[in-house]
Amino acid sequence: MKWNINSTVTRFLGILILAIAAFSASATTKDTSFANRPDVQKFIKMMVKDYGFNQKYLNQLFSQVKLQPAIVAGMSTTKEQLPWYKYRDIFITQERINQGVAFWKQHQKTLTAVSQRDGVDPSVIVAILGVETYYGKHQGTYRVIDSLSTLAFDYPARAKFFREELKEYLLLTRENNIDPMQLKGSYAGAMGQPQFMPSSYRQYAVNFGSSGQKDLANNPDDVIASVSNYFKQHGWQSQQPIAMQAQVKGSAYKVVPSNQLKPNTTLQKLQQYGIIPATQVAPTAKASFLVLNMPNDAQQYWLGFNNFYVITRYNPRINYAMAVYQLSQAIKQQYTKQG
């Protein structure tokens, strides 16, 4: 057999180059593993110093974290950016209304009790759960530790917020003796049927029974009571309006700032600009002027009151709060009709 020396040398060099590349990639991966990143190490040292965590434990924990690049991409494509009429059609469906009525009937006793305690409309509590997780059916598939770590260290736009939530998550799991690698949630790290972020979980979750545990994944009573408590703590006003449609007259209304979250203008002043509420309300009541996009460049005009603003404290988007409100009204109407 005749050997081709040049071919053999070429083949050998090719194998050698591949081996060196593989070794380099392995070394690079090792050197730049998540736990060894300087920003992560800085965070770990802060948790050790300020909150008494074991450094070896946190190093081991973060060595198991898997970054999720798709999460960062998803942060810029949220449904809330859709025009209202498209966003509405996702959540205001007959099936979601039916399921909401069924949930209300099944948990009527708890909903009545927390409503009497906190003054929060039961239909709004039900609607929140309908929008967030389809009444607990879709609680998220990402490991919370992966979601929060990805956003805390690879999403500069809101890194400060998510590092705070990552801190809260580690405290939450330690306080409740939970393995932080086990909990799953949304791409943003929200957990349970009401999709509480870790800070909200620690601050607003309540145990409705006597178990002592605050189980927002599997215990509907705790879920209902916690959502109600969240609204109460954020200033919900019992028996007060949430939102209502408005009519506009003339063109002066165009200079009024629209879609601001917090109500800051009295109805009396809004009427001076031709913005007329569909239902009579005290002229001293404050509202925000809402403009919602409809098909063919049409617009709907609404007024959002304090309780609408409270809903935006759950998610600071006009579309989100309006979906919760309109779903709650549809659920309440059908629930009342059925007796």
Image (cartoon, rainbow, N blue to C red):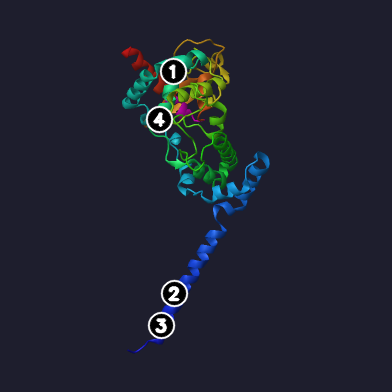
Check disc 2: other Cα within 10 Å, few if <14, some if 14-19, many if 20+: few
Q: Where is 212 relative to 117, above or below?
A: below
336 magenta-colored: no
Cβ atoms at labels 4 and 3 below 8 Å apart: no
Callout in the foreground (1, 4): 1
Q: Quadrant of residue 330?
A: top left
Mark 4 surroundings: few (<14), some (14-19) or many (≥20) residues within 10 A: many
Q: Out of 158 and 142, give the one closest to the viewer.
A: 142
Whether tag 2 and tag 1 are in contact, CB under 8 A, the answer is no
Sequence-wise, which precedes: disc 4 or disc 3?
A: 3
Main SS of residues in magenta = helix
Element type where label 2 sits in the image: helix
For the residues labelled 1 and 3, the Cα–Cα distance comes to 79 Å
Q: Please, what is the three-letter code of the amino acid marked with disc 2?
A: Ile
Mark 1 vs mark 3: give the one in front. 1
**The N terminus - image quarter:** bottom left
Return the residue at label 4.
136
- The circle drawn on residue 15 is 2
Residue that badge 1 annotates: 110
- Rendered view: 71 above or below 323: below
The residue stretch that appears in magenta: 316-323
Instruction: Report the disc number at residue 276.
Output: none
Q: Is residue 307 above or below residue 35?
A: above
Q: CA distance from mark 2 to mark 1?
A: 69 Å
Residue 59: x and y in percent read: 58, 50
